[in-house]
Image (cartoon, helix red, strand yellow):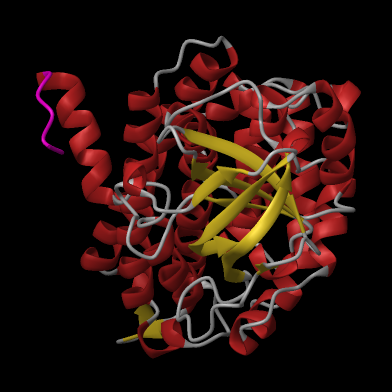
Amino acid sequence: MAVKTDLFVSPDYFNIDELLTEEHLMIRDAVREYVKKEISPIIEDYAQRAEFPQQIVKQMGDLGCFGPTVPVEYGGGGLDYISYGIMMQELERGDSGVRSTASVQGSLVMFPIHAYGSEAQRNKYLPKLASGEWLGCFGLTEPDHGSNPSGMVTNIKDAGDHYILNGAKMWISNAPFAQVAVVWAKNEQDEIVGMILERGMEGFTTPITHGKWSLRASATGELVFDNVKVPKENILPNVKGLKGPLGCLTKARYGIAWGALGAAMDCYDTALRYSKERIQFDKPIGQFQLQQKKLAEMVTEITKAQLMVWRLGVLMSAGKATPQQVSMAKRNSCEIATNIARDARQMLGGMGITGEYSIMRHMMNLESVITYEGTHDIHLLITGMDVTGFNAFK
């Protein structure tokens, strides 16, 4: 049975579709159709070759997957957060790297330009990013500062009519192909500030990261700044301090909470279908108790996560969600997806490690998803601090 024809059917054990509007369902169907037609047939090949399918940038722009919550006047969709979540779920159901491309563009590049930028910056950058004409990336993580971004050493110095930027960022999705980078650095007062860089600025390079076993169809690179001249009008004027980048990460983590769930659904759906067709000891393996136990646990965890992200989407759209709630959902979805991928892989036996099925690719991708934008352990501590009032980070 070749899975080049995408037969995915979404699990909905608690009739959660009834909580969605007609518009939500139309958006989901459109993105699901796109993934089945454009992503599923090609993604194994790109992942095997560790190559980024550049054509998806324009495709996702046309589909409205970049900055769907950004107002229409800047090229966004003006949609609610459940619409955004559903898009991320469907994209990651295809591949985590595809969803990463959209997450970075919408939550980490377009969101800060819209929320923290000037009107001139919004008008210059947002429409081109929304359409997919330009690809963006987000520079926060450094070689020595991952979970502790406040320790960053990338810095800007005032040089009269411009700033001089020096430093480096690492593990940056989209970097090798991005025309625009939203970068965070410390100024001479030791305050964290954001700025917009454009490809072609002298001293700004984006070396590609090679040798990844995860997110192989996603482009990852570094951002290196060697005395880059940054015009003063490129500084984001409306935010200072760590709350700037952390505000972006809250939006991105929200998308991941839905996205990782999509990967979990795909692994479950693949294992369920396989369990009905694979015959061992004269019967389908789905008839054996241990396989049923795996499937039952998978669909239970998926259902719990569906309810969590739906409720979180309602809170986000109402402006009531806390970063801590987003943190819990991100960690939960990543954890259940990682466990489901592993169990699904076991159910497929040796076939589970081949590119004929999506599971091993999801499994490797999820090892990055559970790590980036706040590791599993850091998110546990965020929840721990929220419920106890004690800071375990210091």
**Relative to 42, residue 197 above or below:** above
Along the line of sight, the residue nearer the viewer: 11 or 144: 144
Along the line of sight, the residue nearer the viewer: 67 or 199: 199
Identify which residue is drawn at 79% across, 33% down.
Answer: 26
- Whether residue 8 is visible here, answered yes or no, is no
Q: Main secondary structure of the magenta part?
A: loop
Along the line of sight, the residue nearer the viewer: 147 or 143: 143
Magenta stretch: give its range.
Answer: 389-394
Along the line of sight, the residue nearer the viewer: 361 or 296: 361
Q: Residue furthest front?
A: 160
Q: Is 195 positioned to the left or the right of 367 in the image?
A: right
**Total marks drawn?**
0
Give the image location of residue 296, x and y in percent. 31, 51
- Whether residue 325 is visible here, answered yes or no, is yes
Q: Magenta segment: does it hold 344?
A: no
**Relative to 71, residue 331 above or below:** below
Q: Magenta segment: does it hold 392?
A: yes
Q: Is 53 positioned to the left or the right of 332 in the image?
A: right
Q: Quadrant of the N terminus?
A: bottom right
Identify which residue is drawn at 68% across, 81% down.
Answer: 51
Give the image location of residue 107, x and y in percent. 62, 38
Q: Quadrant of the C terminus?
A: top left
Q: Is 284 positioned to the left or the right of 193 in the image?
A: left
Give the image location of residue 58, x and y in percent. 87, 57
Residue 368 in which image quadrant? bottom left
Identify which residue is drawn at 30% across, 87% down.
Answer: 281
Q: Is 327 positioned to the left or the right of 264 in the image?
A: left
Give the image location of residue 20, x and y in percent. 64, 23
**Relative to 169, residue 11 above or below:** above
